[in-house]
């Protein structure tokens, strides 16, 4: 797995070690946005190995590799916008290196793509067949276009070299092991609420996101990886429960049990107005449906941050 020390990766390493007694997990990460402490306790696990490596450089593995989850890429807007050229390099050169590894080992690869490939969507909810409305010049382009190019390379490797591929398009996911400084909406609001600070809503807060709890998402990952070779995707994975950002702020405030205020800051450029997955395909192909409602997922996440802070 690449990006195994990040938010999704830390959860996925644990899930695989727990639920798949035959699986050995190699976590490849350069700690660009991930944290060593997310995987520290796994270092003594007999079926876990950590490799510190930047996927922009070619990747070699001493063991036979059967399955690759490619998660390495900063996911939070402030992080991927910090060095946008590097973000594109990770998405384009990084995936090429990972695909070469898959080719050498005849491994299956699952690519963590994103709802961002739909850009500012004009089809709602977003179906996989929708080709999106993405800016190639804005501040989100490094990520959006990078991920689009990565999908394109994954499918070209599949057609040219017969590599077994799986593409999942992830919609806003949250949960334990997020970095308190990550910068995404759920972690920001929870950390602010716990610290008694104003919740920073960007714009007027009428833009929407659909929130998926991490355990639900990762069940979708594992089912996708185990699916027949003919199931290549792209498949949307997310929870169709859609909220305005202002509603998310209200919910977090209520669940933390605080009356901190909401303060408004300018909406970042190209911030999508709405986002909600159509998950019919995942339901049909993978028998997958998210089960954790936002309230329950947020409560578990608040618990995690309480301890973390
Ligand atoms: P994250 O930033 O917490 O984790 C990313 C991990 O990748 C970190 O551990 C980081 O150090 C590592 N990494 C980054 N660049 C690397 C490089 N060049 N070489 C090796 N490791 C590198 O983000 P996350 O939320 O866990 O996201 C994981 C993947 O899922 C990303 O590819 C992201 O684009 C995708 N995704 C996530 C969401 C979400 O809501 N969490 C939504 C859509 C897509
Ligand atoms: N957002 C916000 N306050 C914050 C962080 C984010 O209002 O402190 C908004 C952001 O402008 C966006 C939504 O919340 O409209 C989701 O942002 P996030 O960075 O979590 O993910 P993405 O925009 O990539 O979906």
Image: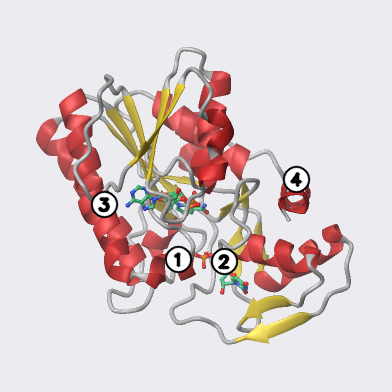
The quarter of the displayed image where residue 91 is located: bottom left
Number of the label disc, if any, that sits on residue 300: 4
Question: Which comes sooner in the sequence, label 1 or label 3?
Answer: 1
Q: Looking at the picture, how far across and down is residue 62, in whole percent?
A: 25, 23
Say few, some or many: other residues with alpha carbon within 10 Å of mark 3 (under 14 / 14 to 19 / 20 or more). Answer: many
Q: Are the residues tagged 3 and 2 within 8 Å (C-beta)?
A: no
Question: Is the residue indicated by label 1 positioned so its CB lies within 8 Å of ligand 1?
Answer: yes
Q: Which mark is residue 108?
A: none
Name the residue: 20% across, 24% down.
Answer: 105
What secondary structure is marked by label 4?
A: helix
Corner quadrant of residue 42: top right
The residue that label 3 is drawn on is 150
Query: Within 8 Å of ligand 2, the CB of disc 2?
Result: yes
Task: Tell me how far mark 2 sits from mark 4, CA to CA.
Answer: 19 Å
Of the four image quadrants, the one with ligand 2 is bottom right
Q: Earlier in the sequence, mark 2 or mark 4?
A: 2
Give neighbour class at mark 2: few <14, some 14-19, many 20+ (Cα, 10 Å).
some
- Residue 202: x %, y % from top left: 61, 80
Earlier sequence position, callout 2 versus callout 1 = 1
Please give the residue where the numbered disc 1 appears in the rendered image.
Answer: 79
Residue 230 in percent (x, y) is at 29, 28
Image point 10% across, 37% down: which residue? Answer: 160
Residue drawn 29% across and 63% down? 86
Instruction: Check whether the beta carbons of the residues at disc 1 and disc 3 lie within 8 A of each other.
Output: no
Label 4 or label 1, whichever comes before in sequence order = 1
The C terminus, quarter of image: bottom right
Asked if one can make out residue 205 in the rendered structure from this viewpoint, the answer is: no
């Amino acid at each position: 797995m690449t990006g195994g020390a990040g938010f999704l990766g830390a959860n996925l390493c644990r899930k695989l070690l727990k639920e798949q007694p035959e699986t050995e997990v190699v976590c490849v990460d350069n700690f660009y946005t991930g944290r060593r402490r997310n995987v520290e306790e796994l270092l003594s696990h007999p079926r876990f190995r950590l490799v510190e490596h930047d996927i922009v450089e070619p990747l070699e593995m001493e063991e036979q590799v059967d399955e690759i989850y490619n998660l390495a890429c900063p996911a939070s807007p402030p992080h991927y916008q910090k060095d946008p050229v590097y973000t594109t390099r990770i998405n384009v050169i990084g995936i090429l290196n990972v695909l070469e590894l898959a080719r050498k080992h005849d491994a299956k690869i699952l690519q963590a793509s994103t709802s961002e490939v739909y850009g500012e969507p004009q089809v709602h909810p977003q179906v996989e067949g929708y080709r999106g409305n993405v800016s190639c010049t804005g501040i989100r382009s490094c990520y959006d276009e990078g991920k689009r190019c990565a999908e394109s390379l994954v499918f070209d490797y599949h057609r040219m070299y017969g590599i077994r591929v799986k593409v999942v398009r992830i919609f806003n996911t949250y949960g334990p092991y997020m970095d308190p400084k990550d910068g995404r909406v759920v972690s920001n609001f929870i950390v602010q609420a716990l610290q008694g600070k104003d919740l920073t809503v960007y714009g007027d807060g009428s833009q929407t996101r659909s929130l998926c709890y991490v355990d639900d998402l990762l069940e979708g990952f594992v089912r996708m990886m185990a699916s027949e070779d003919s199931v290549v995707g792209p498949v949307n994975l997310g929870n169709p429960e859609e909220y305005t950002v202002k509603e998310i702020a209200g919910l977090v405030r209520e669940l933390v049990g605080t009356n901190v205020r909401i303060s408004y800051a300018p909406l970042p450029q190209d911030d999508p107005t709405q986002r909600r997955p159509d998950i019919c395909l995942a339901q049909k192909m993978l028998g997958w449906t998210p089960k954790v409602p936002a309230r329950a997922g947020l409560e578990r996440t608040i618990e995690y941050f309480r301890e973390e802070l």
